[in-house]
Amino acid sequence: MAERDWHVLLVAGPSGTGKSTACATLMREYGIGTAELDDLNAAVVAMTTPDQQPALHYWSTHATERTWTAEEIVDVTLATVTALAPAVAAVVNAHLDHGPPVIMEGDYLLPSSAAALSGPQVRAVFVYEPDEDQLIANFLDREPDEGPQAMRAEVSRRYGEWLRTEAAAHGLPAIPARPFRTLPDRIREAADRSPSS
């Protein structure tokens, strides 16, 4: 098993960057489990109403009412991620208090939230992909029945740029997704040299 000096590793970034695949490799190397931030979002949405958590339910209640720009979708995503932050913090703290070590990965983590949680036992790494054509190819490979997803790729690129800038502002590592074959190693290295360590 690979050695680690953290208890919770947070790996975040936009959809289509290879986080899940890289984290599956890390999970095997470290011999620990993973938790999907996307699943946490689904659980909180299922347990709340639009009146209780309007930001978390916004997309499902407004998605078809008009045509959205990529920038607007990123804004809705940021509002969603902000609303989910207390739930993410609760799960991280539960693992620190009495839970097993874990890699938590997904779209739903802000650098400001990660910075607040980071410390000797919690590390955070953000992954981004700056090339929309690569994101389109990634989505097509993962979801061939959906066809080319240019808008989704633009959203992921824009969200990734925002995360990269904010991660730097909070002293957290943000690494490019490619080359994919070395992404698990680069996530591990970034976590090992994280300023929170």
Image (spheres, helix red, strand yellow):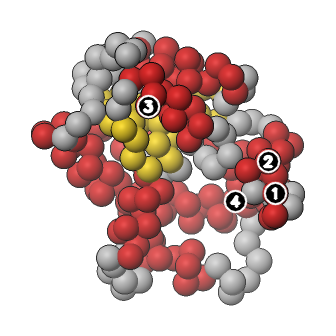
In the picture, residue 1 is in which quadrant?
top left
Numbered disc 4: secondary structure: helix
Numbered disc 2: secondary structure: helix
Residue neighbourhood size for the residue with mark 2, other residues' Cα within 10 Å, grouped as few (<14), some (14–19), many (≥20): some
Amino acid at pointer 3? Met
What x and y, as percent, mark residue 170?
A: 43, 31
Q: Looking at the image, which is closer to me, 16 or 145?
A: 145
Residue neighbourhood size for the residue with mark 4, other residues' Cα within 10 Å, grouped as few (<14), some (14–19), many (≥20): few
**Which residue is at 44% across, 31% downward?**
27
Q: Which residue is mark 1?
A: 144
What x and y, as percent, mark residue 153?
A: 76, 52
Judge left or right: residue 70 versus residue 164.
right
Q: Which residue is mark 3?
A: 27
Q: Which residue is mark 2?
A: 141
Q: Which residue is mark 4?
A: 71
Q: Earlier in the sequence, mark 4 or mark 1?
A: 4
**Which residue is at 26% across, 49% downward?**
91
Could you give the CA–CA distance between mark 1 and mark 2, rounded to whole angstroms? 6 Å
Q: Earlier in the sequence, mark 4 or mark 2?
A: 4
